[in-house]
Image (cartoon, coloured by chain):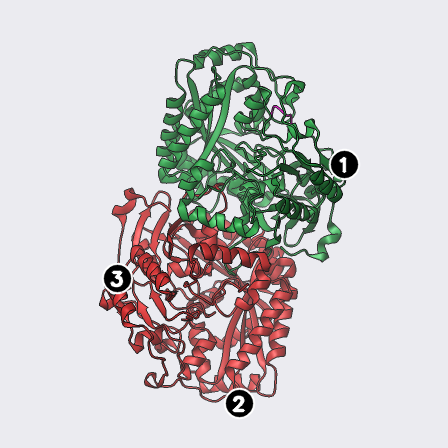
Chain colours: A green, B red
Amino acid sequence: MTHDPRTEPNAVSLADTAGTAPDMSWFAWGDPAEAKELEPGLRDLISQVLRARTEDMPPVAEADVVLPASRLDSGLLKAFTELLGAEHVLVDDAARLIHSGGKSTQDLLARRAGQASPAPDAVLYPADHDEVGRLLELCSAERVAVVPFGGGTSVVGGVSPLDGGFQAVVTLDLRRLNRLVSLDTTSLTAVLGAGVRTPHAEAMLAEHGLTLGHMPQSYEYATIGGYAATRSSGQASAGYGRFEDMVVGLRVATPRGTLDAGGPPASAAGPDLRRLLVGSEGTLGVITEVAVRVRPVPERVVDEAWSFPDYASGVDALRALAQSDTRPTMARLSDETETFVNAAIGGREAVPGCQAVLGFEGTDAEVGARAAVVRKVMEAAGGTALGPDPVAHWRETRFHAPYLRDTLLSAGILAETLETAASWSDLLPLYAAVVGALTGALEDDESGAVVQCHISHTYATGASLYFTVATGAGTDPAARWDRAKRAASDAIVANRGTITHHHAVGTDHRPWMAAELGPLGGEVLRAVKSALDPHGVLNPGKLIPEA
Amino acid sequence: MTHDPRTEPNAVSLADTAGTAPDMSWFAWGDPAEAKELEPGLRDLISQVLRARTEDMPPVAEADVVLPASRLDSGLLKAFTELLGAEHVLVDDAARLIHSGGKSTQDLLARRAGQASPAPDAVLYPADHDEVGRLLELCSAERVAVVPFGGGTSVVGGVSPLDGGFQAVVTLDLRRLNRLVSLDTTSLTAVLGAGVRTPHAEAMLAEHGLTLGHMPQSYEYATIGGYAATRSSGQASAGYGRFEDMVVGLRVATPRGTLDAGGPPASAAGPDLRRLLVGSEGTLGVITEVAVRVRPVPERVVDEAWSFPDYASGVDALRALAQSDTRPTMARLSDETETFVNAAIGGREAVPGCQAVLGFEGTDAEVGARAAVVRKVMEAAGGTALGPDPVAHWRETRFHAPYLRDTLLSAGILAETLETAASWSDLLPLYAAVVGALTGALEDDESGAVVQCHISHTYATGASLYFTVATGAGTDPAARWDRAKRAASDAIVANRGTITHHHAVGTDHRPWMAAELGPLGGEVLRAVKSALDPHGVLNPGKLIPEA
């Protein structure tokens, strides 16, 4: 990625906004004040459906959390302080607790029970690419493990501070890399610091009438660097593409120096190294800047919901759209269970069958024409138009699910998600296998389970499946979910799904990576890691399977 | 890439067609009978424009070509023969001559002058993936260099039989890997053998109403495996995407075993290893099967040509299209010189300014609507519609240019192409720099030069530039072109272009790869190569820069 000095004058920084960006709660998603209490009636209904005796599971007080002592010796503390300044090297319990993991159900269960081990021995806040590079050289030389940290939204253990057997582990919080480094309004590309959160990115781009269009459920806290590191996919991926498709170039700091990849819009100059760094989850280097494609803010949004008699006919309709040249910007399809549950939660009457929501974003000139072409495809596939209201309801509530998970957890109900993707041919058999595996693993004397699913990302050759599971917490909720997750993951691998479509690998999916990559694929990743991180200090225990 | 046994019954092979697929001429592109003689009047005109005394440069007779003796010892010959059968191990001069290089101007000049050194010590024709794998294990153990060979269309030295300092070099001609391995008409994916040529692929897919839609100028001879190995881009890339975008999965044989990559439509399971193998040019392994996205054969094609007062306004128009949600399937724009020359060669009157050709392919239902939206964009950008005829003319003649190059070469005129891509912001400065470099390097006492250019591939963030250069051959045509190519490549690198947009790297672009990748990027590729090809026998001297 080459920096274009001609565009530097456009650089904008809303540092004040970003500097005060709040941390997420140490025991819950986002700001716990956003999580509403569960109405007693609804709680009773859920308990009844799940056949579960649910008991309150409040988190312990922060003061009661057990945190291991920092192992950072005075020499290292001095070296970090000299490099970053004392105010950017934190070893206090509050900072270490917040960075002791991500937001998987296992993370939340541990934290709520007062366990925060492992915790990082220090939290470092580098200012820019060069400081990250010097930190990595230092940590490599001193054999200190390094965990990059963006918004801390990982639900797969991606930011767990594992020390990999080294003397200490530090977390690199990248929030100070929060600038719009440059903007090219002709080529429609922006270089953003890795620590920029989505609302901040959108605010800086909106000043130029531009948008990134990347809106995953985690968007409020998740960062640009995190999106690239984990191959994120936003809710409007049908129109805007996956995050990896938006990445024009990357700047990566490694213990062996800087790696710049990409820049030109296309190339045949050997393998595309961007695609080796995207998805590397901090194991090959720390992404410090990302050049992304941006687009004009859409002039018009058209929404339409559709009903299908069953999941199979809805899947056929979404496939027809994904394989045509005229597509919606956003397309989702819930199965029968999710359609029913969503209506019940929203207090609306459920239309029998499966509901799809479509959204179209673009210019006034073309959105209507596109929606009209799509309408014909949906009608031909047996769909019944439901108008825009169900889509509006989805738009209002679409970022609330992680808060609801916390609410349910406090009420003794486990609600977790997992996801995969497969070809259109494999999709329904995979769906049935995962539903069967989850139900089989969870239906027992302690509780039943409700498994629902939606397709949220469609491609010409296949689609994603996103499962939400609710079950009583039982006597050992961590073991309970672990059992379900293993059963689902085995079913995914056995049915030609990918172990993850957009949650990434981290620690949780790593046991299935050998199957995903094959033995030589794992060797390739280990060879690249050896070249860039010879001592193996970068995010140990994540992503790359052991030999 | 997982093979789906359910789709195997669909497998089709037109082995008879493929088995007799002709080789290209040993001294020219394709079948030299296709190359028409230059009319004396046109030759005089070209000589006049170029201020060059042109003399006939006929090729030597095949019997006069100097071919080094095969160095294959009897032990190796026996081992290859036992593995493949005697009829699939060729050491005769005719087979070795045909495989002694690709089709760059330097290749053609050498061959026409009777030089075919280096030549492969043997040409091997493995039957399938397993035979390729066993060959690679053998060659690695015996330290024999291996050059994979598809259609032999490389114009960058990609199939030159360099021995890398080993005792011998063999060329693997992959033409027997010519099957449609499987077809999934629901997911719209096909698994094709690496040696399948495009017309054969299209014939097999057409039986199912499907097409790949990948039509580069080399399509008649180029193979599926070659497209993947070189990150090829077809003439309708605006609609069908680059070949790498069509690749759903790959099967690759290496000296250390088989590597399968891809399969699901999208994934966040670590870096995308497909993108590491695509573009690897035989240096990391031999691609034996490619799973590609296929599409319904278009129901309708709509063509329209446009005129713009100058290149800059035409570039703005193409940019507007590439950055919108409604795009043509094919979009090209010639600069003023190329617009004039094309008209002159076609015997038509040139419209002043620059000509663009657009094509739309798709269903009856949507092609018209798409073309209408685009028409408004072109008019708003200052374009004048010229109707479909200029596009029809382009379609008729679009695969003739390599034959014209041979015709001109026989008449003492060098005509060669080179290409790059850059962001929209960088495009016109890069264009001017390359034109200047080529003119500066070629304008001398022996001849002038005509440099023309078109954009043939557009992206949201930038576009390709494709230059065609004509100049008198002079007394030392190889040195003459080498000088021009170096000047252009230096100008490309200095102006933020990629060293190649779709011709790939081979030997010719390798000196600029260190600049393209940076030092750590080169180390990454060397690390991957060491893991997969520990003795370095795979296509030595290509692509990967030395440490």
What stretch of residues is rendered in magenta? A23-28
Residue type at the position of mark 1: Glu
Residue B161: percent from left, percent from top? 40, 71
| Residue sitting nearer the eye, B32 or A228 | A228
Residue B487: percent from left, percent from top? 60, 74
**Mark 1, secondary structure of its residue:** helix
Quote the CA–CA distance across marks 3 and 2. Answer: 54 Å
Residue B62, by quadrant, is bottom left
| Residue sitting nearer the eye, B409 or A371 | B409
Quote the CA–CA distance across marks 1 and 3. Answer: 68 Å
Q: Mark 2 points at which residue?
A: B53
Residue A91, by quadrant, is top right
Quote the CA–CA distance across marks 2 and 1. Answer: 75 Å
- Camera-near label (2 vs 1) is 1
What residue sits 66% from the left and 54% below the top?
Answer: A186
A253 relative to B299 in the view: left or right: right
Residue type at the position of mark 2: Arg
A262 relative to B66 in the view: left or right: right
Crowd rating for badge 2 (residues with CA inside 10 Å; few <14, some 14–19, many 20+): some
Q: Is residue A27 magenta?
A: yes
Instruction: Say if labels 1 and 3 share a chain.
Output: no
- Camera-near label (3 vs 2) is 3
What residue sits 39% from the left and 18% below the top?
Answer: A443
What residue sits 43% from the left and 52% below the top?
Answer: B246
**Mark 2, secondary structure of its residue:** loop
Chain hosting mark 3 = B
Residue A254: percent from left, percent from top? 61, 49
Q: Which mark is residue B254?
A: none
Q: Mark 3 points at which residue?
A: B83
Q: Which mark is residue A87?
A: 1
- Looking at marks 3 and 2 on the same chain, the residue that comes earlier in the sequence is marked by 2
